[in-house]
Image (spheres, rainbow, N blue to C red):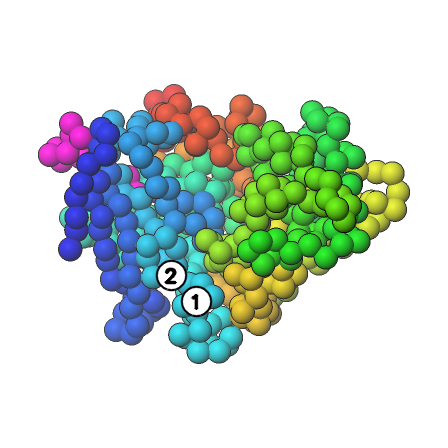
Amino acid sequence: MSVSYRQPGVVLTDRHFTVPLDHADPAGETIELFAREVVAGDRARQNLPWLVYLQGGPGFGANRFVGKPAWLGRALKEYRVLLLDQRGTGASTPANRQTLPLRGGPAEQAGYLTHFRADSIVRDCEAIRPAVTGGAPWTVLGQSFGGFCTVNYLSSAPEGLSAAVITGGLPSLDAHADDVYRAAYPRIERKVAAHYARYPQDVERARRIADHLLTHDVVLPNGYRLTAEAFQSLGILLGGAEGSHRLHFLLEHAFVRTAGGPALSDAFQEEVQGLLSYAGHPLYALVHEAIYGQDTRPTAWSAERVRGEFPQFDAAKALAGDGPLLFTGETVHPWVFDCDPALRPLRETAELLAARTDWTPLYDPARLAANEVPVAAAVYHDDMYVDTAHSLRTARAVRGLRTWVTDEFEHDGVRAGGPRVLDRLLALARDEA
């Protein structure tokens, strides 16, 4: 049953779908998907083509927009938009510490989570498309991990697409997770250096906070154990347009004087726990490295292992000298399953996923080389989250794919640049630019 209602300038319809957990077993267990249809209020009765939006992540539900901000306003000029909560996220059947024990023990939970990668998400899209469009192909907009899903879509079901637009999400077709992180740490180091060049006062502030965490046991109000390594992971902010400024404002008043000496302020702790907690998106931590698994090699906590090749990221070593503390970026480490109460019950499940050796390929190079779907991709020049060189190599491997390489935006360009970014990419896909 669908329900429609209005917001300023738009009509929204909440839609629910039932799909197989395992599309290879269509008669087996099912899960529920939620998607929100959005159409401009003055075009609600028109027969418009469809655009389905695939959110970044993995593990995040689709944006909850009010009205038509960012890219949505541009899309609504010609499309009905479907904002899909990918399986396990948002209002779709959730996968978290509360629900996963219903599957059984860690082995059963890990087996269940193997069905939450890009290939299953794309098959979900194809399963619901006939009910949404009447069978007509649609345009897909994939942001970040949503772009990974879009490349899988082009590999596995291009007949479902009239066009594809990708923002900051062209994956390597064949890189192991180790290759991804080996390329990532130098990019992260550049972002940290740029932050300290902009805010040199933050060098000492970050060192002081890390030193405090190395010598004190700090547990945030939500039960998250804040270690120096966890503090370093706040560097994930540096990949966004406003991230450096947000990090600076976070650091500037971290300490307060107390009867027991300097302590991290309640305000600092409250903001940090909101940034670090995985309670709202546990799949991000659970399957993050699995999105790179494509063969018999385990991911085996790749980000943690590869970090050992870059000793400059070791907090204790940095503080023993006079160099700056380096923040880290989009990396998931085994210790987060000890620090975060939302993840602690899932530590063994995560270990089993990290050890898995039967990942199937996500992309079909031969089919991509013969691609006939109009496709355009924004590649951000020094994207902290997705390696530019990997993206451009993939762009060359997809027949007809047109790129817009820009340093005007960071990874969140489709939000920050909004209508202009989407307009440029749609024009490229149509060969109008």
Q: Which residue is mark 2?
A: 94
In the structure shown, which secondary structural element does the residue marked by tag 2 occupy? Answer: loop
Q: Is residue 9 above or below residue 344?
A: above
* Residue at 78% from the left image edge and 40% from the top image edge: 207
In the structure shown, which secondary structural element does the residue marked by tag 1 occupy? Answer: loop
Estimate the x, y position of residue 202 in percent, counting from the top left. 73, 32
For the residues bearing labels 2 and 1, Cβ distance under 8 angstroms: yes
Q: Is residue 288 above or below residue 100?
A: above
Residue 376 position by quadrant: top left
Residue type at mark 1?
Answer: Gln
Estimate the x, y position of residue 338 in percent, counting from the top left. 63, 64
Estimate the x, y position of residue 236 in percent, counting from the top left. 60, 42
**Mark 2 or mark 1, whichever is nearer to me:** 1
State the quadrant of the N terminus: bottom left
The segment highlighted magenta reads 41-52
Question: Which residue is more in the foreground, 179 or 250?
Answer: 250
State the quadrant of the C terminus: top left
* Residue at 76% from the left image edge and 43% from the top image edge: 262
Answer whether residue 163 is visible to the viewer in this image. Answer: no
* Residue at 66% from the left image edge and 61% from the top image edge: 335
Q: Which residue is mark 1?
A: 98
Decide whether residue 48 is among the magenta residues: yes
Decide whether residue 113 is among the magenta residues: no
Task: Count neighbours of disc 2 (C-alpha within 10 A) and say few if under 14, some if 14 to 19, many if 20 or more.
Answer: many
Question: Which residue is more in the foreground, 294 or 94?
Answer: 94
Q: Report how far apart the C-alphas of labels 2 and 1 lie in the structure.
A: 9 Å
Horizontal side of residue 149 vs 36, given as left or right? right
* Residue at 75% from the left image edge and 27% from the top image edge: 200
Task: Count neighbours of disc 1 (C-alpha within 10 A) and say few if under 14, some if 14 to 19, many if 20 or more.
Answer: few
Residue 36 position by quadrant: top left
Estimate the x, y position of residue 253 in percent, counting from the top left. 67, 34
Residue 38 position by quadrant: top left
